[in-house]
């Protein structure tokens, strides 16, 4: 077996969700610097294109795609558009997520949390990862190659008082990552997560 391609980004294409945010932009910039073709996905394609303009000016092949990770139809339509544009998706970075900023006095105890707040955050941070991964994984399996990276949080590992919704979502992503990694390790797919702190 030729192992040289395992660490090579030559001819690779990545799909990055939440690309318009700060972490998403940094991920796109880093991948582009390695010669990866990048599908930058977020809610508004025009906003993403504006955000990625500096990378394009530097010669990066970064293209903007509209995607609402909470909508399965939107996700699958965007993945089809990315595949049509680039021919394949080798790398998936599940970065889209929401952080409801609450200052020290504004943190919510669990018993005060409204169901709509709980559901909104899990819809984006957990269900969104489910939709996007399920849309992309089949073509990785067919190719026998794939790299999936999920952006989680240290809150998912140790908890975070006042943010039961966020910590629960990120903990779910961590366990999802471990499970998907075990399911696909022998099929050419690696699945990992990165847990930034404050």
Image (spheres, rainbow, N blue to C red):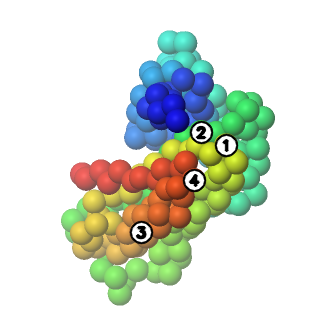
Say above or below: 115 vs 143.
below
Q: Position of residue 169 (x, y in %)?
A: 43, 68
Residue on which the image places disc 1 = 143
Whichever of labels 2 and 4 marks the residue nearer the N terminus, that label is 2
Whichever of labels 3 and 2 marks the residue nearer the N terminus, that label is 2
Residue on which the image places disc 2 = 90
Helix, strand or loop status at disc 4: helix
Instruction: Determine the residue located farthest toward the top in the rendered image.
Output: 58
Residue at 30% x, 51% y: name it.
Answer: 196
Whichever of labels 1 and 4 marks the residue nearer the N terminus, that label is 1
Residue on which the image places disc 4 = 187
C-alpha distance separating marks 3 and 2: 22 Å
Residue at 57% x, 36% y: name it.
Answer: 14
C-alpha distance separating marks 2 and 4: 14 Å
Select label 3 or label 1 by which is in front: 1
Whichever of labels 1 and 2 marks the residue nearer the N terminus, that label is 2
C-alpha distance separating marks 1 and 2: 9 Å
Whichever of labels 3 and 1 marks the residue nearer the N terminus, that label is 1
Q: Position of residue 76 (x, y in %)?
A: 73, 52
Residue on which the image places disc 3 = 175
Instruction: Classify 10 Å Cα crowding around label 1: few (below 14), some (14-19), many (20 and above).
Output: some
């Amino acid at each position: 077996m030729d192992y040289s391609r395992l660490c090579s980004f030559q001819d690779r294409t990545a799909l990055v969700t939440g690309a318009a945010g700060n972490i998403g932009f940094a991920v796109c910039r880093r991948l582009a610097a390695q010669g990866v073709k990048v599908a930058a996905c977020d809610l508004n394609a025009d906003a993403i294109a504006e955000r990625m303009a500096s990378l394009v000016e530097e010669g990066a092949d970064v293209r903007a795609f509209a995607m609402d990770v909470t909508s399965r139809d939107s996700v699958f339509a965007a993945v089809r558009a990315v595949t049509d544009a680039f021919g394949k998706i080798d790398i998936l970075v599940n970065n889209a997520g929401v952080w409801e900023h609450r200052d020290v006095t504004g943190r919510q105890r669990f018993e005060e949390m409204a169901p709509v707040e709980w559901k909104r955050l899990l819809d984006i941070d957990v269900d969104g990862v489910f939709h996007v991964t399920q849309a992309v994984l089949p073509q990785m399996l067919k190719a026998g190659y794939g790299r999936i990276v999920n952006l989680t949080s240290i809150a998912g590992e140790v908890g975070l008082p006042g943010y039961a919704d966020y910590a629960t979502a990120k903990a779910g992503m961590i366990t999802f990552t471990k499970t998907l990694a075990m399911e696909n390790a022998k099929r050419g797919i690696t699945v990992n997560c990165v847990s930034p702190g404050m």
